[in-house]
Image (cartoon, grey):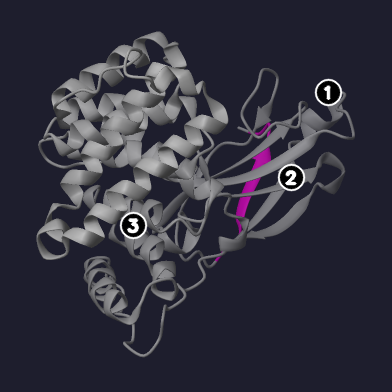
Amino acid sequence: MVMASFVVAAVLLGLLVLGGALWPLWRRAPRAAGGLLVALGVCSLALYRLVGTPQALQPHATQAPATMDAAIARLQDELQRNPQAAEGWQLLGRALAAQGKPEQARDAFARAARLLPDDPDALVEAAQSRSLADPQRSLDQEAVTMLERALALQPSHQRARWFLGVAQRQRGQPAQAAATWEPLLTQVDASTANSLRAQINAARTEAGQPPLQADTPAAAPASAGVNVEVSLDPDLATGVHLSGDATVFVIARQAGGPPMPVAVQKHTLQDLPLRITLGDTDSPMPTMKLSALKEVELIARLSASGNAQRGEGDLESAPVRVKLPAKDPVKLVIGGR
């Protein structure tokens, strides 16, 4: 009975939301709008007959709410009984947003995102709702984390890429914003590409970069590869027994920024001493590249567990800050002072 009531409330709320959205069409073409509403009702009924109990749709089981407020209240009641219904939280968030209640909508979308951590659409919707609930329309760190997760799951997700670029621009990172937006030029139509290119060029100008040419879909950023030489401190090598299959991570991260790497390579202890070049192809995130940064912090870590995150007993080199592009190799000594 709980699930039946939940589905009915969701269907009714969907009809109310769709009815509001179709109002302009109704005035111009009432037959078309009416047909869409009927089609939705029929599809909802057919879906419920496949997964639910048809008897629950009888008038004695559920009385239809007369207003949007009543439908929202009904849905909220059912979500209290069935809090794991992610789609219900999404529907509630959309309805609350349509009513001009951004803070409540944000909370509903956040519940949906927690239930759907691997759904890019749910993550982006939750991130966007955080911006709409903020008086300054800012995307906070939690929203950025959601957007980065969505892009990691689906690099071609247009809304995730757009909003992440907006967040980077808001944070005074115009080069990163431009680099994040540029791949969109190959995914949108010509009209949208023209307005998008203007936004990209504004960000590139702010970052001191030349604008994109109008006849090219995207200009690849110049490579900012950095040469790194990694070695083991001689005293450590002779005084400590190290497993030959220990893992060496060479990491570049944003100077003064979050600890997540913008470039990383994995090698073995037997590879030392090591000479490598870290570049854009070593980035674990498509939205953050070495070429978009002016300064990075480099570190080498010897990990017995094979995990890139620092663990107990891991050995590291002293971190070295480097301005890009770097002409000379950067020397990192694991265990050195």
Q: Please tell me which residue is depicted at 54% across the width and 36% down the height of the picture.
A: 118
Q: Amino acid at mark 3?
A: Trp
Q: Is residue 140 visible?
A: no
Q: Nearer the viewer, mark 2 or mark 3?
A: 3
- The circle on residue 249 is none
Q: Is residue 19 visible?
A: yes
Residue 69, horizontal then vertical, whole percent: 14, 24
Q: Quadrant of residue 83?
A: top left
The span picked out in magenta is 328-336
| N-term-proximal mark, 3 vs 1 | 3
Q: Which residue is mark 1?
A: 240
Q: Please tell me which residue is depicted at 29% across the width and 31% down the height of the picture.
A: 12
Residue 278, horizontal then vertical, whole percent: 61, 58
Residue 268, horizontal then vertical, whole percent: 82, 42
- Tell me the distance, in whole angstroms, between the alpha carbons under discs 2 and 3: 41 Å
209, 57: nearer the viewer = 57
Secondary element at tag 3: helix
Within 10 Å of disc 2 (Cα), the crowding (few <14, some 14-19, many 20+) is many
Q: Amino acid at mark 2?
A: Ser
- The circle on residue 162 is 3
Relative vertical location of residue 185 with respect to residue 28 in this rendering, above or below: below
Secondary element at tag 1: loop
319, 285: nearer the viewer = 285
Q: Which residue is mark 2?
A: 231
| N-term-proximal mark, 1 vs 2 | 2
Q: Amino acid at mark 1?
A: Val
- Tell me the distance, in whole angstroms, between the alpha carbons under discs 3 and 1: 50 Å
